[in-house]
Image (cartoon, rainbow, N blue to C red):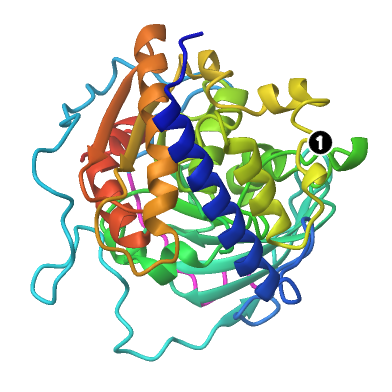
């Protein structure tokens, strides 16, 4: 193992201490309101939903998404991947009043429509998980509450369907894009911070944004050997089955996430080879055992008033668990997935506390992870943005940059 220079060690240690302090203090302030893993976050929508109610769009014929057998990777040669720059020369674009970023913040000029509830479908996942309620926020977006066996609680997921989607699709299916939230956030973040609903309005794709707990780490929590809650199995198994059975989802899928959700996007794709044709990481934690990162991960957990060992146990005594849930160590599982890795250098302006420091801590492992994928011969594209920081301004641009790769994995035009 090459030696790490003292300046690099000193910088890493200083960043870890700063990040740890910030996460602990910030989390402590919200600890009373933050649910522990497995609890159900409060939803702003009405409590009970209805499948195929008047709120759902009328059926219309749409082309079938290319289907594959469960667990089988879509052909990587079916849709040629676009060529993206690996290192943009210009500084990271900052939003102004005249030039919003490619994926903009949602408009708040119009009042939100009144949610419409309906009777949920009766289908169940193979392990007995079920849709308990379904609330349509508008004709294309709904919040569904799922009784999850893997998590051991009711879990919320927000879903956006295509304009011509119908619960009675006559055999037509649509590919699925998973979007995962980060720490100290929830399943509403993508619709709250971006215009994702209007972005996909003309695209034949189902978008699903699951709740992954207050830390945003979609993993199987160790919890002293209980192995619950298991948000990864909820996302990649239970939710997937229910979408196929009740929402006409196909077996063509892509996944993307921000921060700890970016970790989840890559880790799920590696743990379930071939399940996701494409995966995108925006400022992701891609090497959980890199110098200083176990302390950051534990601080993220502690910041939500959760015992740090509940995640994967002690980093030394439970080293095997940490390695099993480390994207860098499990990268060989991505051979059937096209991967997009994005990160800033933490040198731009940031309104988010520790937004610069977190990005500076994550950037080296993102670069190292991309190098590992290249060595393994895994289809991969990168975008390392000068001036990018750990916030939604950066992630909106990163999403837009990654869209051609995600669209290719979904079988859609870019």
Secondary element at image label 1: loop
Q: In this view, does 318 lie above or below 44?
A: above
Residue 277 seen from this side: no
Residue at 55% in and 26% down: 327
Residue 34, image x, y percentages: 71, 70
Nearer-the-camera pick, 400 or 96: 96
Which of 158/347 is in front? 347
Can you tell which quarter of the image residue 90 is in? top left
x, y percentage for residue 104?
A: 25, 66
Residue 400 image offset from top left, x and y in percent = 24, 49
Which quadrant would the C terminus be assigned to in this image?
Answer: top left
- Count of number-bearing discs: 1
Q: Using residue 124 as the reference point, say whether residue 118 is left or right of it.
A: left
Above or below for 118 versus 253: below
In the figure, residue 271 lies in which quadrant?
top right
Could you tell me what secondary structure mostly forms the magenta stretch? loop
Counting from the top left corner in percent of width and height, residue 295 is at 65, 42
Is 138 drawn above or below residue 289 in the view shown? Answer: below
Judging depth in this view, the residue of 160 and 219 nearest the camera is 219
Asked whether residue 44 is drawn in magenta, I would say: no
Picture residue at 36% right of the left edge, 57% below the top: 60
**In the displayed structure, would residue 382 be above or below residue 192?**
above
Q: Which residue lies furthest to the right in this view?
A: 225
Q: Which residues make up the magenta segment? A: 49-62
- Is residue 346 something that shows in the picture? yes
- Residue beneath label 1, please? 313
């Amino acid at each position: 193992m090459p030696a790490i220079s003292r300046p690099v060690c000193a910088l890493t240690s200083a960043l870890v201490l700063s990040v740890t302090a910030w996460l602990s203090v910030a989390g402590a302030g919200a600890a009373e309101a933050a649910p522990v893993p497995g609890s159900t976050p409060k939803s702003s929508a009405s409590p009970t939903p209805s499948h195929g109610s008047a709120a759902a769009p009328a059926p219309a014929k749409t082309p079938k998404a290319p289907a594959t057998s469960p667990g089988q990777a879509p052909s990587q040669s079916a849709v040629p991947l676009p060529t993206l720059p690996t290192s943009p020369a210009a500084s990271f674009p900052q939003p102004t009043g005249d030039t919003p970023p490619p994926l903009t913040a949602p408009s708040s000029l119009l009042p939100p429509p009144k949610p419409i509830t309906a009777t949920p479908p009766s289908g169940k996942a193979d392990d007995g998980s079920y849709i308990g309620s379904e609330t349509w926020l508008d004709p294309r977006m709904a919040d569904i509450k799922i009784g999850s066996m893997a998590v051991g609680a009711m879990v919320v997921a927000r879903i956006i369907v295509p304009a011509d989607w119908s619960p009675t699709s006559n055999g037509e299916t649509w590919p699925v894009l998973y979007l995962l939230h980060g720490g100290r956030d929830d399943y509403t973040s993508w619709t709250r911070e971006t215009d994702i609903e209007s972005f996909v309005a003309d695209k034949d794709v189902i978008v699903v944004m699951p709740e992954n707990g207050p830390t945003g780490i979609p993993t199987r929590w160790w919890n002293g050997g209980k192995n619950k809650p298991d948000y990864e199995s909820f996302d990649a198994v239970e939710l997937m089955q229910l979408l196929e059975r009740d929402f006409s989802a196909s077996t063509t899928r892509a996944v993307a996430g921000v921060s700890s959700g970016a970790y989840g996007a890559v880790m799920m794709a590696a743990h379930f080879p071939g399940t996701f044709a494409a995966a995108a990481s925006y400022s992701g934690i891609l090497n959980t055992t890199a110098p200083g990162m176990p302390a950051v991960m534990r601080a993220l957990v502690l910041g939500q008033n959760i015992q740090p060992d509940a995640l994967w146990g002690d980093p030394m005594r439970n080293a095997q668990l940490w390695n099993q849930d480390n994207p860098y160590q499990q990268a060989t599982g991505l051979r059937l997935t096209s991967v997009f890795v994005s990160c800033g250098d933490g040198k731009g302006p940031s309104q988010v506390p520790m937004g610069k420091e977190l990005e500076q801590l994550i950037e080296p492992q993102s670069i190292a992870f991309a190098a590992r994928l290249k060595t393994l011969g895994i289809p991969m594209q990168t975008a390392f943005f000068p001036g990018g920081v750990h916030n939604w301004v950066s992630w909106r641009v990163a999403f837009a940059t990654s869209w051609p790769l995600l669209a290719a994995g979904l079988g859609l035009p870019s």
